[in-house]
Image (cartoon, rainbow, N blue to C red):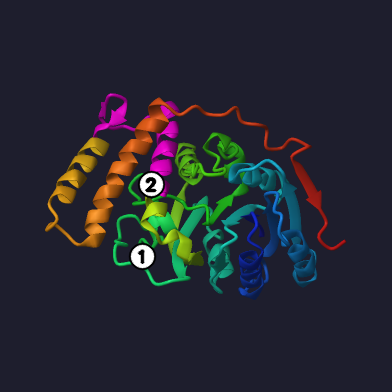
Amino acid sequence: MNLDVIVPTHNREALLARTLDSLLAAERPEDLEVRVIVGDNASTDGTAALVRRQAPRFKGGLQYLFVREPGKAYVLNACLAATSGELVGFIDDDEEIDPGWFRCVRREFGREEVDFIGGKCLPRWEAPAPAWLGDGYLGVIGWVDPGDAAQPMDETYPGILMGGNAVVRRSLLARVGEYSTSLNRTGQRLLGCEDEDMYQRLLASGGRGLYRPDLVIHHFVPKARLTRRYFRKWCFWRGVSRGLIDRSRPAAVVYLGGIPRYLYGRAARGLLRIASPRRGGPAARFASELALWDLAGFAYGKLLYRVPQPRAAGAASAVRAQNPVT
């Protein structure tokens, strides 16, 4: 069985070093051949030099791609085009895989009824979690823990397939197509949801998914993201991204003025809680405020946001493959 692991990165040399170390330290079943593809999104730090230094340790199993076009979706698409394995894994450059990650992959894909798997994303804190951090918006910092029981990843699953901890059959990815570049995150625009968009397309294509609690990664949470300002900005731009997705793929819910009615209800309940200081603690009150940012972002993305014309991710001028050994 062949597995290509894609690691998109941008100016995170120190964190990427830990990611690569974890990929080497994890136990690999003898019948699982692993290749790692680092997609460098025009980094200006020592990322390229780091990959060159690490290459001998991987014994030919490390590939470096330089992608000039800014945006994670372009990197993912360029790396996907470079894959050849039966399976494609996705982890981020601020993550470390658990020692049993490869064993879980090999075991689950030994069964033909599985097309993709996802798992836990546990935090590795740079600073203590603030008192206002509840359990309703943990996705802002990439904390995903649906529990210790395996469960199908389908329409009933309480979440999505996170791109920072996923393995998908390459045949299924070829069927659903590339990541959406209209959801590209660049500069101060925290667009995203390319994972959510891809997950919906995997399900729509008939893909059979499974959540595995033992497919674990450890995600670095920097101090800079543990601020109310960052949470507000993230929620707004996630709303924008979902509004953009909704333009072409509306949900099966009731709409009011082009906006899902449940978003109005959630925001209204949030306003009531904010207006009643005695209702709930700091976490509940801040979650109520974030519901307003969700609504504002969705409305802007659905009704007002102008999508830039995307460029082809595979353009020869945008992607350059390099041999990190030489």
Q: Which residue is mark 2?
A: 235
Q: Position of residue 310 (x, y in %)?
A: 61, 31
Say what secondary structure mark 1 lies in.
loop
- Residue 281 is left or right of residue 3, and the answer is left
Does 38 lie within the magenta span?
no
Say what secondary structure mark 2 lies in.
helix
Residue occupying the point 34% across, 67% down: 130
* Disc assigned to residue 40: none
Residue occupying the point 55% across, 37% down: 180
Q: Which residue is mark 1?
A: 149
Above or below, 216 relative to 85: below
The magenta span reads 233-261
User: How far separated are the C-alphas under marks 1 and 2?
Assistant: 29 Å
Contact flag, marks 1 and 2 (Cβ < 8 Å): no
**Residue 1 falls in image quadrant:** bottom right
* Residue 147 visible within the image: yes
Does 234 lie within the magenta span?
yes
